[in-house]
Structure formats: structure tokens, C-alpha cells
Image (cartoon, rainbow, N blue to C red):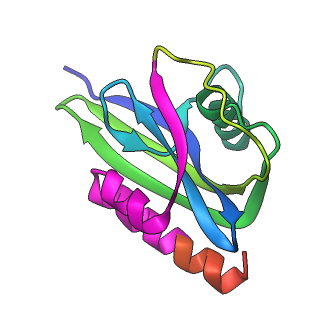
Amino acid sequence: MRIKYEHSCGAILFTKENKERQYVLVMEVTGSYGFPKGHQEGNENDIETATREIREETGITNIRFIPNLKRTIRYKVGDFIEKEVVYFVAYYENQDFDIQIKNEILSAKKYPIDIALNLLKFQELKNILVETDFMLESLGE
């Protein structure tokens, strides 16, 4: 059987409350937490895919991507799917969650980094969040 390659895009989405960064996690129907992400559609570029997925999975529409800050992870799903996910980093403020694809996403909520790290199951996602938080701090975001 041939290996299938999948490419997805999403974002580590954050806001600030009382000068503390809060990160958005979505809970998928499987019960696992992650960042908003999904497959490219049509001729979308990576940023367009990430923007659409943020809108569909969280309802957040007015975002600002942090320039030159993104992370890519690669992993296998079973024996025959190799997946690559590009995560951009994006900021939003003063918007409420409104999940568009309720058959895929159970909830979208914002959490301080310590709680977000406890909710994330996969070590690679935890690593990306810690690295991103460090970079945002150093950029003064």
C-alpha cells in the first residue's frame, strides 16, 4: 500500500488578559485538545488555510499573524499516512467563540499556558507552545 501525504495548516492563537497571554485550544470530537488546524482546500495557500480553519473552528475572524513565526511538525497516522502541519502564530482581541463545524470541534476556549500545557496530550504540541511563548515574550508580544 502506498503512503499518503497530508498537509494541514493552523495557528497557535492567543490573546491577552490582564497582560497575560491566553492560548486558544480546541477540543476535537475525539476529546483531545489541540490548536485550530485543518486541510488545505482548492488553491489556498498556507495562510489562507490557517485563517479559514481559525474561523471555522473558533469563530475568530479578526486576527494578526506574527511575522516570521511559525512551526512545522511531521508525524505518521497509522502505517500509511504521513502528515505535515504548519502552525502560524496569530493574535486576536475582544472576540467571542462561535464554532462553525460542530461535528468536528466540541469546544474552543482560551487558557493560560500552564493549563494549556496540562490539557495538550502530545509532547510535540507542548514543545511548540513553550517555544512560541518564549518567542512571543522575547518579541514583547
Q: Which residues are magenta?
A: 104-132
Quadrant placement of the C terminus: bottom right
Q: Is residue 32 left or right of residue 112?
A: left
- The x, y position of residue 32, in whole percent, is 32, 38
Check the image and name the residue furthest to the bottom. 138
Along the line of sight, the residue nearer the viewer: 42 or 63:
63
- The x, y position of residue 137, in whole percent, is 63, 81
Rendered image quadrant of residue 42? top right
Rendered image quadrant of residue 88? bottom right
Quadrant placement of the N terminus: top left
**Which residue: 56% across, 41% down?**
9
Check the image and name the residue furthest to the top. 103
**Which residue: 69% across, 70% down?**
18
- The x, y position of residue 67, in whole percent, is 75, 65
Q: Is residue 117 left or right of residue 139?
A: left
Q: What is the number of callouts on the image?
A: 0
- For residue 97, above or below residue 112: above
Check the image and name the residue furthest to the front. 18
Along the line of sight, the residue nearer the viewer: 20 or 69:
20
Rendered image quadrant of residue 49? top right
**Which residue: 40% across, 61% down?**
115
Residue 113 belongs to the span the image colors magenta: yes
Q: Is residue 30 left or right of residue 138?
A: left
- For residue 8, above or below residue 88: above
Along the line of sight, the residue nearer the viewer: 47 or 99:
99
Residue 91 belongs to the span the image colors magenta: no
Along the line of sight, the residue nearer the viewer: 16 or 88:
16
- The x, y position of residue 69, in whole percent, is 65, 66
**Which residue: 31% across, 46% down?**
75
